[in-house]
Image: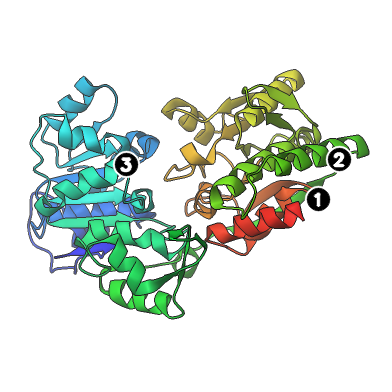
Amino acid sequence: MPNEVHAPRLPAIRHPVHRRKPSLGAAIRHGPRLKGKTVTTLTALANLLFDSFEAHKVLVIAPLRVARDTWPDELAKWEHLSHLTHAVAVGTATERKQALLERADITIINRENIPWLLEQSGVPFTYDTIVIDELSSFKNHKAKRFKALMAARPLVKRVIGLTGTPSSNGLMDLWAQFKLLDMGQRLGRFIGQYRNAYFTPDKRNAQVVFTYKPQPDAERRIYDRIGDITISMKSTDHLIMPELVSAEVQVHLSKAERKHYEQMKHDLVLSLPAGEITAANAAALAGKLSQMANGAIYDELGEQHHLHDRKLDALEDLIEAANGKPLLVAYWFKHDLARITDRLRNLGIEFEALDDGASIKAWNAGEIPVALIHPASAGHGLNLQAGGSTLVWFGLTWSLELYQQTNARLWRQGQNAKTVVIHHIITKDTIDERIMDALEHKDKTQARLIDAVKAVIK
C-alpha cells in the first residue's frame, strides 16, 4: 500500500501523450520551477488524478489558516494546476457541508473538523487519497482527531504525510503518525508494542512510568523500519536558501527587579509538592519563571502583576534599529501581547496581529511594519516570507517544533532577502538562558525541562 511521509514521491515521468489535462511530466518539462512542499504535493496529486489515475478523490487536512489560505493560494498561483477543482471546508457547519458536496478534485479541511467530517457531517466518506499537512499534529494517539481518522483509515488507499518536525519531542512521537500511514505495519498496531520494542522506562514512581528513554539502538532500528515509505530532505541540501543569522539581545534586571524575581521564584519553589519534580509541576514552575523573565506574571486569580519592562525596551530598540524594515514579533503569553500592544500604541508604531487571512495578505504585501504572531497559531504552514526577513522572539518556547516552524515562516524558499535574522530577547540569569540552551542543542525530551528547573531551584 503506497504510503509516504515528509514529501511525496513524484511518480515517474512518462513519455508525452495527448491529454485534455496536463500531466506531471509536461509540468516538469515545460512548466515553472516548483517551489515548496505544497506545490510539489499538488503537482504529484494532479498526476495521480489525471495521468496515472491512481487517485479519484483527495482530502487535504491542514491547520486552519493553512487550509483556508495557503493551499487555495498555491492552487491559484500555478498555471499547471489550473485544471484542478477544489473546495475549502472551513467556517460554519453549513459552509463546510456545502464544500463537501461540491465533489471537487481536492477538498481541503482543517484538522479540528475531522471528527465532525466523519461523525456529524452526514456526507459519505469516499476519499481514496489523504494528504495530512503537518503530520506531526497527529502525534497524540489519544486525541479525537487521531481516533476519528483512524476509524476511516481502512477506507483510504493512499496517505501522504508532510512535516518538517516529525519527532520534535523524541522518537515516541513517531508511532501515531506512522500508524496513520501504514495502520501499524512497521511500528506496531499498539503503542505498548512500540514502547516495549524500542524504549525502556525512565522516570517513574513505583508502577507509574512518567517518561521513557530510547534503547541504545532504537533510532537506527526505527529508521530502518520506516525507511521504505519515508523521504527526508533538508532544504539546505537541495535549495538555495538565504543566510540565517541568529542573535541574542540580553537585558538585565535591576537590583530591585532581581530581588523581586528571586523572591517570587523562592515562593513558587516552596509551593511545589514535596518529593521528585515531575513533568507536570516542572512545566508549571517553568511557565511562571518564563512569565517573570518576560516582565509580568499571572496570580492564581488570573490577575496580571507587572515586574519589569526590560524586554519591551529591547523590542523598542530593535524596531528603531530596523529603520522601517518590517519585523515579525513572536510572543508567548497573553500579557506579552497586551504589553507589546500598549507599548507600540504609545510609540505611535503601526502594528497588527496576524490572526486572519486579511492580515497575512497585508503583511506579505509590505503593509504592516510590525506583525505579532503566536507560534502555536502561526507556526505551521503559513507563507510569511514576502513580508519581511527579521523575526524577534519576545518570549521563548520550550517546544522545538514550534520554534523551528516559526523560524521557517521567514527562513524558507521564496525569501527574497539574502539574509534572515532571528533575534532572541533574553533576560540575563533567568530561565530564558536555559530555554535558549535547550533549543540550540535541539533537545527533544521533557528531561531537559525538568533538569533545567532543578538547576534553577538549586
Residue 329 is marked as none
Residue 7 in view of the camera: no
Q: CA distance from mark 1 to mark 2?
A: 9 Å
Q: Is label 1 in contact with label 2 (beta carbons under 8 Å)?
A: yes
Residue that mark 2 sits on? 258
Which percent across, then down, holds residue 123? 10, 32
Q: Which of the two discs, 1 and 2, labels the residue nearer the N terminus?
A: 2
Q: Relative to the observer, which residue lies in front, 27 or 412?
A: 412
Give the crowd class for mark 2: few <14, some 14-19, many >=20 residues within 10 Å: some
Q: Is residue 136 left or right of residue 262?
A: left
Q: Residue at x 25, y 67 (%)?
A: 188
Please determine whether, in this image, residue 378 is positioned above or below residue 90.
Answer: below
Q: How many marks?
A: 3
- Image x and y of residue 22, in percent: 16, 53
Q: Which residue corresponds to mark 3?
A: 71
* Badge 3 or badge 1: first in the primary sequence: 3
Circle 1 residue = 429
Q: CA distance from mark 3 to mark 2?
A: 48 Å
For the residue carrying disc 3, how many other residues have a C-alpha within 10 Å: few (<14), some (14-19), or many (20+)? many
Q: Amino acid at mark 1?
A: Asp
Which residue of the protein is positioned furthest toward the right in this rendering? 255
Q: Residue at x 48, y 61 (%)?
A: 206
Report x, y in % for residue 195.
35, 67
Could you tell me which quadrant the C terminus lies in?
Answer: bottom right
